[in-house]
Amino acid sequence: MEVTGVLSVNNALEPQDIEVTPTTEDITIEPAEGCYIRSVVVKAIPNNGGGTGNDGGGTDSGNNG
């Protein structure tokens, strides 16, 4: 037995681009009425200034030889 389906996009729908800022809570994204989601951009987490200035990039001392 073979099951086939047809996927069609209603041309009347408008594309919607969504931007979200990550939080500690779950994020659910749904398109607005009459729209479909074209893209989702996740923004960087804002720096609250509480760090030490180290970007976590390692301990490179500048000696590469």
Image (tube, rainbow, N blue to C red):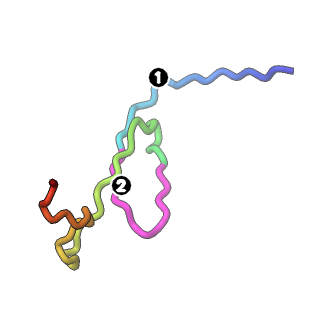
- Furthest toward the front, the residue is 65
Answer few, some or many: residues within 10 Å of disc 1's Cα (few below 14, many 20 plus, some between 14 and 19): few
- Residue found 48% across the figure and 48% down from its top: 30
- Residue found 30% across the figure and 54% down from its top: 43
Residue 39 picture location, percent across and down: 38, 39
Q: Specify whether residue 21 is painted magenta.
A: yes
| Circles 1 and 2 in contact, beta carbons < 8 Å | no
- Furthest toward the left, the residue is 62
> Tag 1, which secondary structure?
loop
Which three-letter amino acid code belongs to the residue tagged 1?
A: Asn
Q: Specify whether residue 27 is painted magenta.
A: yes
Does label 1 or label 2 sit earlier along the sequence? 1
Left or right of residue 53: residue 20: right
Residue with the mark numbered 1: 11
Mark number for residue 20? Answer: 2
Residue 64 picture location, percent across and down: 16, 55
Q: Which image quarter is the N terminus in?
A: top right
Q: Which image quarter is the C terminus in?
A: bottom left
Answer few, some or many: residues within 10 Å of disc 2's Cα (few below 14, many 20 plus, some between 14 and 19): few
The span shown in magenta is: 18-29
Relative vertical location of residue 32 with respect to residue 47 in this rendering, above or below: above
Mark number for residue 41? Answer: none
Residue 8 picture location, percent across and down: 57, 22
Residue 5 picture location, percent across and down: 70, 23
Relative vertical location of residue 34 with respect to residue 53 in this rendering, above or below: above
Which three-letter amino acid code belongs to the residue tagged 2?
A: Val
- Residue found 25% across the figure and 62% down from its top: 57
Left or right of residue 2: residue 60: left
> Tag 2, which secondary structure?
strand
Distance from label 1 to label 2 (Cα)? 26 Å
Main SS of the magenta segment?
Answer: loop
